[in-house]
Image: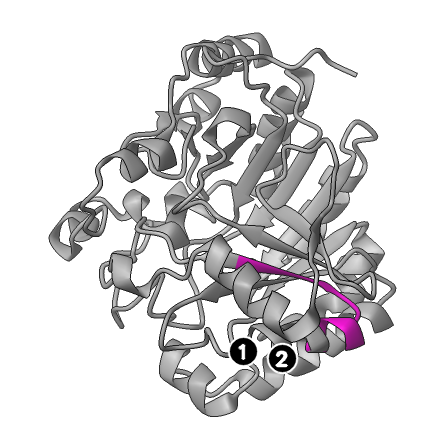
């Protein structure tokens, strides 16, 4: 295994999130609240062979976890072909996808056959009317069908991600845990973040990790932390019956000190932090004929100089407003969550 690069805060380069498209078939209020967006030019989208070559360079530098994201990654035509390329790398310990689940029932068997290890599905509510209000699409039944298809396809280690928003779905925490038991899948509750397209974010809508634990303790009794060594973003907890769930508290309790993840957009910009305002262009050198050694030097230089601690910086502001306004997002679509991946 390659020795991982470390940045200025001694954080290793281990975890790469690869966006394969900026398109999405939902319009979730916390991510894509507008109906129309400035899309990346198709000719600038990386081909699968280009993604595979860049991932090879990242693996040489210590990356052993890759997650395919979007937008909605299942909108990318022929995605199993990319998965087959990446799954052939024995150094990748974890090859996963994050999807909204709308197209998952159709694609789950092919994803598994191609060599995908795990699936994470975004599920913010169990109520169809709430889903329609939050996403402005009537695809709730398809999402549930997609989740049901995951174990049938042979996947294990499934996770369900829920962005918790006060007054929207914060009364469904226990219901979602019960649903996760049946899938089976581990539920991860995510604090509402002031990043990317979350132009309607406000501090009042954030339900903190402390509040979530209080609510669940009233329902289930004593909850204990799961003690483990991990750089994963979720703090994991165990209910009295052994059920495990996670909370990603990026807004009120950032994990910047342990963050080992970076993001590659579908058009080849590399972002070192979810809150970063600028990325490093890898597509230009790649298509310009750069050697693997030159690409390796570019990535090495970027990571070893990394100082980012975006969530900590945001928390230190005290009074917070959304990170970017709509006008700024239209000028630079790379600032959108659906472009750089979550």
185 is within the stretch colored magenta? yes
Q: Nearer the viewer, residue 248 or 108?
A: 248
* Residue at image mark 1: 172
User: Looking at the image, do the residues carrying marks 2 and 1 touch, with CB atoms under 8 Å apart?
Assistant: yes
Q: Is residue 225 above or below residue 316?
A: below
Q: Over which residues does the magenta segment extend?
A: 179-189
Which residue occupies 39% across, 47% down? 251
Q: Please state if 200 lies on the left or on the right of 48 as rendered.
A: left
Q: Please state if 24 lies on the left or on the right of 106 as rendered.
A: left
Q: Regarding mark 2 in the picture, which secondary structure is present there?
A: helix
The CA span between labels 2 and 1 is 5 Å
* Residue at image mark 2: 175
Q: Position of residue 66 (x, y in %)?
A: 65, 38
Q: Position of residue 332 (x, y in %)?
A: 22, 44
Q: Position of residue 161 (x, y in %)?
A: 58, 61
Q: How is the image coloured?
A: one colour
Q: Nearer the viewer, residue 168 or 274?
A: 168
Which residue occupies 39% across, 77% down? 168
Which residue occupies 43% across, 28% down? 272
């Amino acid at each position: 295994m390659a020795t991982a690069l470390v940045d200025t805060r001694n954080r290793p380069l281990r975890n790469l999130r690869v966006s394969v498209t900026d398109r999405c078939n939902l319009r979730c209020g916390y991510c894509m609240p507008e109906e129309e967006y400035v899309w990346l030019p198709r000719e600038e989208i990386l081909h699968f062979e280009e993604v595979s070559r860049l991932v090879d360079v990242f693996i040489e530098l210590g990356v052993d976890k890759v997650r395919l994201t979007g937008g909605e990654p299942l909108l990318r035509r022929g995605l199993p072909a990319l998965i087959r390329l990446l799954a052939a790398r024995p150094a990748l310990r974890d090859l996963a996808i994050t999807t909204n689940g709308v197209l998952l029932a159709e694609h789950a068997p092919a994803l598994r056959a191609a060599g995908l290890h795990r699936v994470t599905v975004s599920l913010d509510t169990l109520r169809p009317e709430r889903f329609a209000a939050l996403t402005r699409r009537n695809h709730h039944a398809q999402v549930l069908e997609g989740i049901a298809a995951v174990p049938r396809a042979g996947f294990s280690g499934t996770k369900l991600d829920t962005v918790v928003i006060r007054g929207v779905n914060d009364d469904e925490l226990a219901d979602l845990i019960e649903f996760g038991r049946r899938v089976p899948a581990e539920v991860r509750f995510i604090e509402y973040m002031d990043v990317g397209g979350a132009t309607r974010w406000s501090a009042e809508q954030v339900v903190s990790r402390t509040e979530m634990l209080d609510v669940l303790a009233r329902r289930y009794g004593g909850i204990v932390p799961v003690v483990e060594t991990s750089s994963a973003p979720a703090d994991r907890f165990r209910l009295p019956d052994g059920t495990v769930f996670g909370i990603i508290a990026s807004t009120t309790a950032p994990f910047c000190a342990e963050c080992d993840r970076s993001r590659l957009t579908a058009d080849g910009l590399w972002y070192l932090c979810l809150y970063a305002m600028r990325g490093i262009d890898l597509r230009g050198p790649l298509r310009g004929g750069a050697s693997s050694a030159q690409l390796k030097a570019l990535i090495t230089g970027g990571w070893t100089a990394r100082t980012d601690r975006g969530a900590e910086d945001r928390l230190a502001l005290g009074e917070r407003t959304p990170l970017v306004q709509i006008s700024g997002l239209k000028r630079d679509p790379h600032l959108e969550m659906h472009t750089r991946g979550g």
